[in-house]
Amino acid sequence: MTVAGLMQQRDLAIIDIIRFAAAAHPTREIVSRNVDEPLWRYDYARCFTRVAQAANMLAAHGVKSGDRVSSLAWNAHRHFELFFAVPGIGAVLHTANPRLPDEHLIFTINHAASRVLLLDRNMAEIVERIRDRLETVEHVIMLSDAERSLPGYTGYEQAIADQPKIFEWPRFSENSGAFLCYTSGTTGDPKGVLYSHRSVVLHGMAGGLSGAMGFSAFDVVMPCQSLYHATAWGLPFAGAINGVKFVLPCDKYDGASLQELISSEGVTFSGGVPTIWTMYLDHLARTGGNPETLKRVIIGGSAVPRDMAVAFDRLGVTVQQIWGMTETSPLGVVSTPTPALAELGRDDEQEQIWTRQGRMQFGIEIEIVDEDGAPLPHDGEASGALLVRGPWVLERYFRSDVSACDADGWFDTGDIATIDRFGFMRITDRKKDVIKSGGEWISSIDLENAAAGCPGVKVAAVVGVHHPKWEERPILLVEPLEGADLTESAITDYLASRIAKWWLPDRILFGPVPMTATGKIDKKVIRDAHRDILRG
C-alpha cells in the first residue's frame, strides 16, 4: 500500500502562467504588429491587467465556466491576451483556423458551440460569408481599437476600456478543458482536440526545457507558427513561464517583414513551417542580408530539407526540428544535441540532428511497432507505426465517447518512423503517403527533401500514383522561387547523384503546391489531380 504525500494540492491553471510572468518579469516586453494599426508595445504587467479586463468583458457578455469562445485571429497581442483570459474564467478557447474551407470552418465553430466570436479586422470578409450559418454565436467582437472597428462590430478596446483591471480568478479542476484545436480535416470533418489546463501547463513547462526549446529570460521569441494551430506549438506558455520577450508578427510572414522585426527587436529565437524559412533565406540571399541577432530556428509541420539546415548553419543560426501533431499539443520530439552525439564529432552530430525529427522528451513516450503491434528494435533501421502516449496526448476526440488509444494508452499517429540507439526518431513517411513501387518502398519525405535542396526550388511535393507495371511510381510537383529558371532535366540531374536511380520521379511537374490549412503539403489534392498521369 502506498503512503499519501503531504504536499499542497493545488490544481495547475493556465492563468497562473501569466500571473507569474507579470510578477517575476513585469517589465519584459511584448511587441506586436497588428492589422492596419501601429506597432503595439507593452510588458507582462500591463498584459496581465488587460487579461483581467478581457475576462471581465467576456463575463459581461454572459460567458461562464464551460462555455466555448472562438477566435479568428493572427499572432498579435489581443489574441495572446485571450489565451489567458478565456481559460482563466473556466471557459474554452477554440482557435478557429481561417485557412480552412468555409464548410470546415463553419463546422468547427458550430461543433464547438461557441457563444462568442472574436476576429481580427481582415477576417471580416470570412465572417460575413459564414455569419448566418453560425448556430450558437451570440456576440461578435473585432480585435481592434474603437476607431478601426468596422460598422456592425464592437471593438475589443472599446469593450474592455471600462472593465475592472482585477478579476477574481476561480479555481477549478486542472482537468477542465482550456483550448479546443481542430485537425485540418483534409478528409471528412475536422476533429476536435480538447486540451486541459493540466496538459497545457505541463506541456509549457516541458517545452522550455534544455532538451526542447531551451528558453531563458534573455530570449526574444518571435512565433511564426500560427497561434490558431495547436497554440503555436505551446510557445505562449513555454515563453511566458521563462520570461522571454515576445515579438508577434501578426500575419506578415514574408522575408522582408520578418527581417525587419528580427533587426529592430533583437529576435533570438523563432519557429515556423519550412515554407516560411525558404522565403526568409531567399530574401537574405537577394538582399545580401544576415540574420543578425537570430540564433535558433525551430522548424516543424513537415521535414526540414537538409540544405535549409546547412544554409542556416552557414549564417550562424542553429536549426532544430520538431515533430508533433494537434493530438500531442503538439510537442512530441525535438532535435537537440546530447553528449553521446557530441562524441561522434561535429559533422556526424549535425547530420544526426538535421536528418531526424528529434529525440525523446520527458513526459511523452514514443514507440514503433510492426503490423502485428509488436515493438520493433531502436536501431535506426527498423521502421514501423509510430505510437505515442503521455499527459499531453489525446485520449479521445471532442464529443466522442470512443477512445482514440489502444488498451495500453498508445495513440497511433499515422506516421511511419524509425528510432535509433540515441533515442532520435525519424519520420520516413505517413502511412497513406509511402510509395510501394515493384514491391519496394520509396519514402516520399526523403525524395522531397532531396528535391527541396535543388537551387531555385521553393517547395517540392512527392506523391505516388498508379503505374500499370510497378503498381505505384513517384511524381514530383515543384513550385519554383520567384524568378527561378528551373527545368525538368536540371532537377533530374541534381537528384541523380543524391538518390537511388529507381527513386527518380517518373514525372516532374511545375506549379503551385497546394497546402492544407495548417501549412502542410496537401498530397490528397495532388494525387486526385494527377492520379492517371502515368496510365497507358
Image: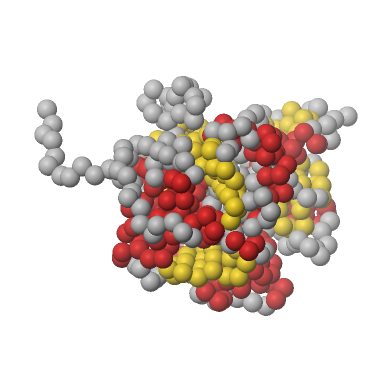
Quarter occupied by the N terminus: top left
Residue under the image location 62 percent in, 67 percent down: 37
Give 213 or 435, whichever is nearer the viewer.
Answer: 213
Q: Quadrant of residue 378?
A: top left
Q: Is residue 305 visible?
A: no
Indicate whether 504 appears above or below 347: above
Q: Is residue 65 visible?
A: yes
x, y percent for residue 445: 63, 45
Q: Quadrant of residue 435?
A: top right
The chosen color scheme is: secondary structure
x, y percent for residue 379: 44, 41
Q: Is residue 234 left or right of residue 534?
A: left
Give 198 or 64, whichever is nearer the viewer.
Answer: 64
Residue under the image location 49 percent in, 30 percent down: 398
x, y percent for residue 313: 55, 68
Indicate whether 212 appears above or below 45: above
Indicate whether 403 appears above or below 344: above
Count of numbered labels shown in the rendering: 0
Give 399 or 503, whichever is nearer the viewer.
Answer: 399
Residue under the image location 54 percent in, 34 percent down: 112
